[in-house]
Image (spheres, grey):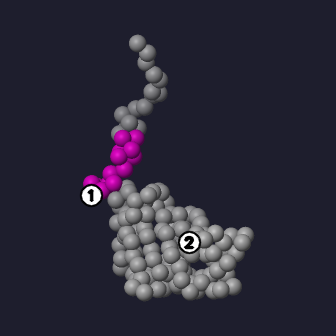
Amino acid sequence: MSIGYLGCINGNDMEKKIEESRAINSSGSTRNEIINNELSTKLETTSYIDSTLFFFYEEFETEINKITWTDEPPAKLSGVILKLRDNYYLDLTLYDIPDSERFNIDRNWEMKKIENSKIDRIRLMYGDEIILDQKSNQ
């Protein structure tokens, strides 16, 4: 019989590790549920549809870890994906993108140049799961 090395963990450390791995708070919600609720509430209580990308970006700036531009077809800007924490991200579809900025063969758009574009659709995602989907009535 073979025994793997688990290392020395005292009782307090073990309890802490178990608590962290479950990521449960005092209300019984998991960390992902808490984040999900925070983001969903923020999106539902403020109408970001038809607002400018600049306004939206300012509201979420501290939570954004990475910006990825979406272009469909290639080189034609259609939206932006804002990577947040813990595998959450916001997928925004834009309209009213300035013609001078819509097409970019190098695909290196700058926020400053398209910040007045409007938001047509917002999807809050966790991995591949759509948590919230808001669309314009246009």
What mark, if any, has residue 80 been given in the picture? 2
Q: Position of residue 28 (x, y in %)?
A: 27, 54
Q: Residue at x 53, y 79 (%)?
A: 94
Indicate yes or no whether the magenta region holds residue 62.
no
The image position of residue 107, as x and y in percent, is: 68, 70
For the N terminus, the quadrant is top left
Classify residue 75 by image quadrant: bottom right
Distance CA(mark 1)–CA(mark 2): 34 Å
| Span of residues in magenta | 16-30
Q: What residue lies at 47% left-to-right and 27% top-to-bottom?
A: 7
The residue to which callout 1 is attached is 27
Question: Residue 86 location in percent, x, y?
Answer: 47, 56
Which residue is located at x 34 percent, y 59 percent? 33
**SS for dot 2:** strand
How many numbered circles does the render carry?
A: 2
| Camera-nearest residue between 29 and 120 | 120
Q: Dot 1, crowdedness within 10 Å: few (<14), some or many (≥20)?
A: few
Whichever of callouts 1 and 2 sits on the residue coming sooner in the sequence is 1
